[in-house]
């Protein structure tokens, strides 16, 4: 998505990716450039396969630790799953995001797909992954967290992003 004519997010995921694939992918991106922010939204595909929530949490923790080691602020996008996975699994899955945000001291968006999930207008044919209209809502959901993270207004945020992109071109 773009805001004020500036690319805010480089989408590093792919449809169907699992949390175990996030750390190697992020390591690869770090070889190319240092992002100004990591917005980590992952785990939904794991839940669809009922991957152990402890494993999902560990995978996400490793990505967060790598970002923190590189002094990259993290915004963690919390996820929810359909109740047909059972109350126990659903509860453990939803708690893992809060646990991670508290233990790693990162910003948490409680439910990043608020207003998008389960709404056919905002999802692809699979009913699970957001379409472009859904991504716009997600970007709007993310914006207040970006503001809070930088404790600044949009003009200063644009300057920070522009500065980072210039650093990448020069370096």
Image (tube, rainbow, N blue to C red):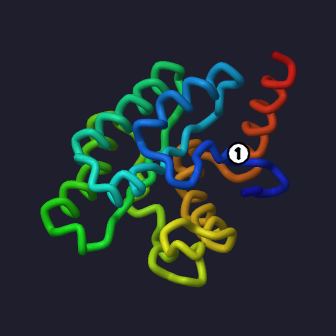
Left or right of 90? Residue 22 is right
Q: Name the residue under label 1.
A: 157
Left or right of 30? Residue 96 is left
Residue 67: x percent and y percent? Answer: 49, 28
Q: Give the residue at x 35% y 36%.
A: 105
Question: On the rendered image, what quadrant is the C terminus found in?
Answer: top right
Residue 28: x percent and y percent? Answer: 61, 25
Count of residue discs: 1
Q: Give the residue at x 71% y 53%.
A: 154
Examine the image and state in which quarter residue 142 appears. Answer: bottom right
Residue 16: x percent and y percent? Answer: 50, 53
Q: Is residue 77 above or below residue 31?
A: below
Q: In this view, does 78 lie above or below 165?
A: below
Examine the image and state in which quarter residue 5 appears. Answer: bottom right
- The foreground one among 158 and 100 is 100
Question: On the rendered image, what quadrant is the N terminus found in?
Answer: bottom right
Left or right of 37? Residue 102 is left
User: Which residue extends farthest top?
Assistant: 171
- The foreground one among 39 and 89 is 89
Residue 84: x percent and y percent? Answer: 24, 74
Examine the image and state in which quarter residue 31 appears. Answer: top right
User: Which residue extends farthest left?
Assistant: 88
Badge 1 crowding class, 10 Å Cα cut-off, few under 14, some 14 to 19, many 20 or more, is some
Q: Give the residue at x 56% y 54%.
A: 15
- The foreground one among 114 and 151 is 114
Q: Considering the numbered disc 1 on the image, is that residue within a helix, a strand or a loop?
A: helix
Q: Give the residue at x 48% y 50%.
A: 41
Left or right of 56? Residue 128 is right
């Amino acid at each position: 998505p773009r805001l004020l004519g500036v690319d805010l997010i480089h989408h590093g995921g792919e449809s169907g990716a699992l949390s175990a694939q996030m750390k190697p992918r992020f390591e690869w991106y770090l070889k190319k450039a240092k992002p100004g922010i990591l917005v980590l939204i992952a785990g939904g595909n794991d839940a669809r396969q009922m991957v152990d929530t402890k494993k999902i949490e560990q995978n996400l923790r490793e990505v967060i630790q790598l970002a923190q080691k590189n002094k990259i602020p993290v915004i963690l996008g919390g996820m929810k799953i359909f109740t047909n996975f059972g109350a126990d699994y659903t509860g453990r899955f939803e708690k893992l995001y809060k646990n991670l945000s508290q233990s790693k001291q990162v910003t948490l968006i409680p439910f990043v797909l608020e207003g998008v999930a389960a709404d056919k207008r905002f999802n692809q044919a699979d009913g699970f992954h957001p379409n472009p209209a859904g991504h716009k809502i997600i970007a709007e959901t993310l914006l207040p967290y970006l503001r809070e993270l930088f404790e600044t207004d949009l003009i200063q945020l644009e300057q920070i992003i522009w500065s980072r992109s210039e650093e990448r071109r020069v370096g």
